[in-house]
Amino acid sequence: MEKEKIKITNKLGLHARAAAKLSHLANNFNSNIFLIFNGDKVNAKSLLGILTLAASVGNDITIEAEGDDESKAVSEIKGLFERKFDEES
Amino acid sequence: MKIKGVIITHGELGKAIIDVADSILERKSDIECFRFEWDEDGTIIEKKIRAFLNKNKDSGIIIFTDMFGGSPANLSLRFNRPNLEIITGINLPGILKFLTYKEKKISFKELLKIVRDGARDGISIISEYLGDRKNGKRKDQNNK
C-alpha cells in the first residue's frame, strides 16, 4: 500500500472541476485509490465522493492506493495537487 | 449495449444542467435535450422524441425528466420499448453520475440505480450532514 499526505494549495480547494480532474485521473489506474480527510475516507474514482470531503485550501489530505500500479497512482495524483489542478498559472 | 441519455424538462432547466455538467467535466456530453414549452400539448416534442428513439434503436435509453407527475414525465410514459427507462426529478449530481458511469462495464439496471442514488444522495441538510460527520455517523454516500 502506498500512502502520501499532501496540502491543498489551489485557491478553490477540492471544488467540482478539480474533483472531476482528480477522479478522471484516478480512473486510469487499476489500484483502489482513496482520499482521507478529517476522518473520512472516500473513493478517489468518484467525483461526488470527493466533493463530500468539502476540503479547502490549506487542508492536508492523504492519498492512499493499493494495487499493481499504486506508486504511479499516488505520484500522479500528488502531481495534480502540486500543479494546483492546472487552474492557476 | 450503448446507452444514450435524453433530458426533457420545463423551460431551460435541462439545458442548464447539461451545460454545468459539461463545464465541470470539461467535455461535451451527448445527452439529447428537449425543452417542454408551457403552451404546447406535447405533439411536437413527442415527434422529436420518436425520431430520436428510431435513430437509436439498438441503444439503451434513459429519459431524465424534472419532476414526477410533470408534463415531461407524463409525456415520456407514452414511449414503451425494451431498455427504455425514465428517471424523474433529475439534478446535477444525478447527471454527473450518469455521464461518469455510462461508459463503465456495468449493466443498464446498475447504471439506473447508481444515477438514482447519486441524485438522491446529492440532497443534504448541511447541518445534519456536518453533525453526522462530527459524531462519526456519516453515511458513506456517493462512494461507489
Image: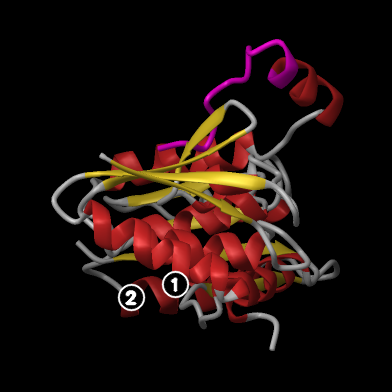
Q: In this view, does A58 lie above or below B35?
A: above
State yes or no: discs 2 and 1 in contact (Cβ < 8 Å): yes
Residue located at (25% from left, 66% from top): B2
Which span of residues is magenta-colored? B133-144
Which kind of residue does numbered mark 1 sit on? Arg
Task: Please provide percent x and percent y for residue A68.
Answer: 13, 51
Percent of width and height locating residue B106 = 24, 48
Residue B54 tag number: 2
| Left/right of residue B59 with respect to residue A12 in the rendered view | left
Q: Where is residue A89 in the image (x, y as percent from the top left)?
A: 69, 89
**Chain letter for mark 2:** B
Q: Which chain carries label 1?
A: B
Is the residue marked by circle 2 packed among few (<14), some (14-19), or many (20+) residues within 10 Å? few
Q: On the picture, is B105 further left or further right than B65?
A: left
As for residue B23 lying within the magenta part, the answer is no
Q: Which residue is drawn at 46% across and 56% down?
A: B98
Mark 1 lies on a secondary structure that is: helix
Residue B99 shows in the view? no
Residue position marked by numbered label 1 in the rendering: B50
Residue at the spot 66% in from the left edge and 80% down from the top edge = A87
